[in-house]
Amino acid sequence: MHIKPFILPALAAVAQAASYSGDLRPQVHFSPPFGFMNDPNGLFYDSKRGVYHLYYQLNPTEIVAGNQHWGHATSLDLYHWTNQPIALAGDNPEEGIFSGSAVVDSNNTSGFFPDQDDGVIAIYTLNTPELETQNIAYSRDGGYTFTKYANNPVIDIGSKQFRDPQVVWHAETQQWVMTVAYAQDLVIGFYTSPNLKDWTHTSNFTQQGLPGDQFECPNLVKFSVDPAVSKDTSKFVLFISVNPGAPLGGSGTFYVVGDFNGTHFTSEVDQETLLDFSKDNYAAQWYSGIAENKPPVSIGWASNWDYTQEVPTGPLEGWRSAMTLPRAHTLTKINGAWTVTHRPFEGLSAVKGRQIVHKSFQSGVVNANFSGVPSNAVYFDVALKGINVAKPTGRVNFNFTSSASSEFLDGGVSLADGSFWINRAGTHLFSIEDNGNYTSPFQTTISSFGKGTFSFSGVIDRSVFEVFLGPDGIQSGTMSFFPRSPLDNLAVSAEGLSDRTSVSVKAWGLQSGWNSTAASRRFHA
C-alpha cells in the first residue's frame, strides 16, 4: 500500500508512541517502531549539533519487504534513539526509495544551501518496475525533512540492476565520489561530481573469485594505518554485500583492501575477507561526518534475507529486524593479512550498568543470574591467560539459559584446535524446522594465542547476540535468536586447561536505550 502524504503525520505519532517492551524487542540494538526494516541508509554525524542520524529501509504498512521508504531515527550516543517521522517516500505506488547515503554539504557545492554550512544531501536509488536510477534530495533543517531535486535522476544508465549509492568527499581531489553496485554484473562502479548533481563515470571494479549472485550496498572507507603495520599512512577498504549467494548462505558482506586515487580502486589482496563469521550481519553502512582522527563507525542489519520475512517478531510484536550494535573499527594486519577489527562503539559506556559478576577460576563453572536486569541485556567478557602456546589444551564454554523454558544459546573456544563457535539451536520459538536456512552453529578459527592469552566478549540482547574475539575484536559473530522465554542466566565453564591457565569472567547489565530521558529527547534544528 502506498502511503498518502497526509498519513505521514499519523505514522510519526505512532512511531513516537511505539512500545519497546516486547520480550523479543532488543534494548541496545536499534529496531523500527513498527513494520519491516532492512538496510541502514544515510548514516551521518551532525557535528554542529552532536547528533547521529540513522535512516533505514522501512515498509511501514507490512511486516515483509516492499513499499520501501526511508525510516529515520536520531541519537546523541548511538544507543539511545528517538524515532523521527519517515524521511523519504515515493511519489506514487510504483516508486520505492531504495538504499543510499547522506552527506553534509558544508561548502554548499550543490548550491542548495546559500546561507548555511550544514545542509544535508540524501543520495538514494529510486526503484520502479522498469528502472533503478540514482536520485538526490536536500534538507535545510538538519536532515529531518527533504525536498527532492527537480532534475532527478542524477544518474540513469537504463538499468534495473543499478543501486545503493554511497557518497564520500575525496579531499585530495576536491570532489564527491560515489560507489554504486551493478548488481547482477558483480561489478562496483565509481562516479565523481563537483556538486552532487552532475556525475561522471570514472571506473569499475571487480575481482576474480568474489562470491555472490548480486552485489549490493558497497561502501568505500578510508582507514588510518599504524606505521608499525605498513609504510602507508592510510588504506581504503571496499565493503561489498551480496544477496543471494553469500558464502554462509543467503546474504552477507565481505571486504577487499587496497588504494583509491579519487577515480580508481586497486585491490592489493588476492581474496576477499568475510566481515562476520556468522550469518546475520548484512549491508553495513559507515557514518559520514566522523572526524578523520577517529575510528570509522558502522551499523549493519542484523538479519539475513534467507529468513528475515518469517521470523516471529512480526506476528507477535508488529516489527521485524534489528540493527547491529554501533561498531568502531580499525585496520591492522594479523599474521600478515589485512583485518578490519570490530568493537562496540565507545565500549558501550552510554548503557553499561551494574556489574553482575567478576570471578577468576581454573575449572568448574561460574554462574551469573541476570533476571533482575530490567533490559534483559548483558555485556560479558571472558579472558584467558597462561595458555601453553606450544601445546594448548582444554576448552572454555559459555551458556545463556532460560530459567522458565531451559532454552539456551551457547558457544566457546577449544584451545587444542583453535576453534571458536556459537550456536542458537537451543532456542525454539523459531528454528531450522521453521526455515531450513536458519542454520547453526557457526564456527571460526583462532590463528594463534599470542603471548599465551585469548579473550572474547559479547552482548546478548533479547533476540540479538554479538561476540567479538580478541582484545581488539579481530573477528565478530552476529546472530539473531528467538526463545520462547527470556534467557536470564549466564554460565561460563572451563575444563581440561593446563595448570597455569586461568579464566576471568566479568559481566554487566545493560541499560535500555528506549526508556531514559536521553531516549525521549528530540533534536530538531
Image: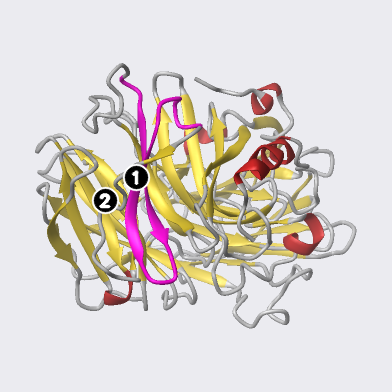
Q: Nearer the viewer, residue 518 or 55?
A: 55
Q: Residues within 10 Å of mark 2 (few under 14, many from 20)?
A: some
Q: Residue at x 20, y 77 (%)?
A: 208
Q: Is residue 200 above or below residue 431?
A: above
Residue 156 % position (x, y): 26, 60
**Mark 2 or mark 1, which has the lower sequence index?**
1
Residue 187 % position (x, y): 24, 69
Q: In the image as oriented, which residue stretches furthest toward the top?
A: 115
Q: Which residue is mark 1?
A: 136
- Write down the region rendered in magenta: 117-144
Q: Residue at x 60, y 44 (%)?
A: 5
Amino acid type for the residue under numbered disc 1? Ile
Question: In the rendered structure, are the residues bearing label 2 and label 1 in contact, judged by CB atoms less than 8 Å apart?
Answer: yes
Amino acid type for the residue under numbered disc 2? Val
The residues tagged by marks 2 and 1 sit, at their Cα atoms, a distance apart of 7 Å
Residue 195 % position (x, y): 20, 37
In terms of image quadrants, where is residue 496? bottom right
Left or right of 4 on screen, residue 201: left
How many numbered callouts? 2
Residue 73 % position (x, y): 57, 37
